[in-house]
Each structure stands twice: as structure tokens, then as C-alpha cells.
Image (cartoon, rainbow, N blue to C red):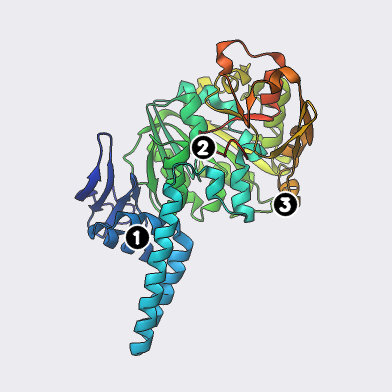
Amino acid sequence: MICPYCKGNLQLQDEIEANDEEITHGIVDCACTSYPILAGILNLRYGRLFEQIVRRLRERKRIEAIGLGLEERMTETTLAVINTLRSKGIYGKALAQTFLRLLELKAQRAYERFADEDASFHDLMGRSDFETYLKHRFSLESFWSLYPFLRLLKENSHSILDFGCGTGHGSFVISTYAKPNELVCVDYSLRNLLMVKKFFAPNAECICLDGNYPLPFESEVFDSILTLDSFHYVRNQASLAQEMQRVLKDKGVLLMLHLHNSLAENPSAGHPLPPRTIASLLRDLPLQMLPERELLQEFLEGNCLDLRKTHSETELDSSEALTIVASRNNRIFRHFHDVANEFLSCDTNLIVNPIYQIKHENTKIILRHFPNESFRKEFPIAEKYLPPQWTLDNEFASKMHGRKLARKLTQVPYSTYEKSLMMKFIIINAPERYISNSS
């Protein structure tokens, strides 16, 4: 791998802790700086936070280092305050030491909470709008656009890059359904990647980086690249598009899902571009661009994916979100039938969707979902397909243990009823400890 800033080779400088599969904690060097490996995650960003993490690792203070990463935003702000106070004389320096001790205490508590083996992903999320969004990621139309492409990913699954993976919902789907030989998850947030390793894709290679800079990979190394609801949050999109084309194999597949369109309104827009401009950034690759809403409708109602159909500029310009499939392999631009088969093929941990409250009324189990107004505004299609209320039939309800189904559905063929619950996202496939079973 290469440094994204100086293009120098990365070399291991200090192996602090390792297991049979990976270096879990360590420090790598290049010509310009030192980067930490923290809980198996290589961090290729720079700044006060990562300087402090490197320092803690050199002092063998592994718990403090992870805690600082978990409290990333607070750590960056506090370190800036401490740096200012240290220039304010003797009293400022004393106050800076107090802030530093408080930061270390906060980091210790964050680690203890994170390390709790009984804590679920939902337990570790707060109540902010963004954390609520993460809790219900599996219930959002922006996420559902991944499912029609599972067959395509399985066909190109030797090495997959999940760019802007967030906390790992898409990484979980890729690792569970496509089963790649190598899955590389990258994101700007160290905290997100710690969640990826803990809950969603523990065997993935995780790298913390800034997508505005060159990717740290050699050319032509990935069979598939996925960017799901993330490309529009990178400022230097021209550079990123060029980099993704560089690291994609000659016949590889680039999937850019839930791309925001600057010509349509979006509550969490980022830095969107118009469809024509996005396409121009991928000038080295043949591509197909689709309106996301039509894509989802074909999947949920028609059980198909049509990558042959072209859309007019007017159709694309009026679409709130877009999907791009790009590849030099012309064979992928075809009509896929029965694309839900892959989606329905795995039951690693089938649970009642956490967006539903479970109510026991006499002998019935009634589900009611409770999205807030911001959810309704941003994800109107999701509410269309997620029934606001559902009564489970008695036979199915007898298989439930809390939220979890008490048996593996692969022991017998899916019933029509069970398939309908999955296609409505009333029950979902989620990682172990995604939510407490009693919640």
C-alpha cells in the first residue's frame, strides 16, 4: 500500500499486538508521517486525533487509543481547546492538563461501553437524528438499492471495495451474500470502522482515509467497487472518480448507488452534481444510469433488474437519486430475472425489523412502526413499502423468540408468507447483536 499524501510506501514500524490473522495494533511509517493501526484498522488520515492515538500506542495504552477513536468528534474539539490553552501561560497549561485528564477518562468509559460483549449495535447508538438513521439503515430506500445487485456482486466477488462504508450495513450484506475472498471497507470515520469490525464485517480489511486524496491501492486490484450513499459527500469527486477507475480491474464493475442529484431537492444533499456531470467523470468506463425509484420498483414489484434500458435526460434530471453501473464488461448490461432469489437465500440472523414495536394483544402479535417526520420526508418510498402496522399469523409468531426467529428458515423452503415478510422488510437479515433480542 502507498501513502495517499506523499505516495511513499507504507512500512510497519512497530507491531504492538497481533493475532494469527492480522496486526491488531501497531504503527506504520512512510516518508511524511506515522499512521496507527488500531483494532485491526489502518488509519491513513492525519491530525491531532491520530497523533494522540499514535502516542498512546507507543506508550502501550491500547484502551485509551481505542477510546479516543470512539469519541472522535469530541476528541478533535477537546484537543483543539487544549492546544489553545497551552499558549495561555501557567494557568492555561494547568487547565489544559485538566481537560486532558477528562478526555482520557471519557476515552476509558467509551472503551468500556464498546468492549461490553452484551452491548448491541443499537445500545451503542444514541438518539441523534444521524444515529437514529443508522439504527434503521436496513429500513431505508437508499439502502434497498443494493439488493438488486447481489447477483452481479457474486459474479464479481473475488475482491470488493466498499467505499464510504459507514458503520457497515452494506459491508454486512456483501460479506453475507456475495462472500468475497477479500472485502476492503474504507470510511472517513474511525468510529464507523470500529463498528464495522465489531458488528458487521469482522473479517474485512478496514482502512480509515479521506476520499479527497488518492486511494492507497495499486492499480487494477478490485473486481467490484461499491459506493452507496457516499460519493456525494466527497468534495473532490473528480479525483475520486478517477481513482476508482484506476483501482478497478479491466473487466471490473463499479456500482454507484443512491447518488444525490443536484437538480432535485435532498434533505442531506452533501455536494451533489447533475447527472450529465457525474457521467462525464466516468469517461473511461461504459455505463448505465438509472433513476433509483424505477430500479426499486422493478426489484420490489417485478423481481428483476434491467441494465439494458436507457433513460432520457429529462427522466434522469428529475430523479431525486440515481444509480450508476459502469464496466468494460459489456456482458453485465443485460436483463436479470428473479433477482430476489439472492436476497431471499440467506438467514444468518433473521429478526423482526427494529423499526417495529412489538405488541402482544391477547394471542396476536402486532407490529407498528414509528418513523419520525424527518424519516418520512427523506424516505417516502420506504414508508410506501413498510406497512405501518402488521399482525403476524399464529404459525409464524410461534417461531419467534423475542425479535429473533427461533429456527433457521433454510431447513425448509420459504413459504409464500415468509417471503412476503422479507420483501416488505418486516423481517430482515441482520448481524448478531444488531439489537437486543428483548428490545
Which mark sits nearer the N-terminus, 3 or 2? 3
Question: Residue at label 1?
Answer: 50
Whole-angstrom CA distance, mark 1 to mark 2, is 29 Å
Question: Residue at label 2?
Answer: 433
Q: The residue under label 2 is which amino acid type?
A: Arg
Q: The residue under label 3 is which amino acid type?
A: Ser
Q: Secondary structure at mark 2?
A: loop
Whole-angstrom CA distance, mark 3 to mark 2, is 26 Å
Point out the frontmost of discs 3 and 2: 2
Q: Is residue 60 left or right of residue 310?
A: left
Q: Residue furthest top?
A: 412
Q: Position of residue 7 (x, y in %)?
A: 28, 52
Question: Residue at label 3?
Answer: 374
* 151 to 289, vertically: above or below: above
How many C-alpha atoms fall within 10 Å of the one at disc 3: few (<14), some, or many (≥20)?
few
Q: Secondary structure at mark 3?
A: helix
Q: Secondary structure at mark 1?
A: helix
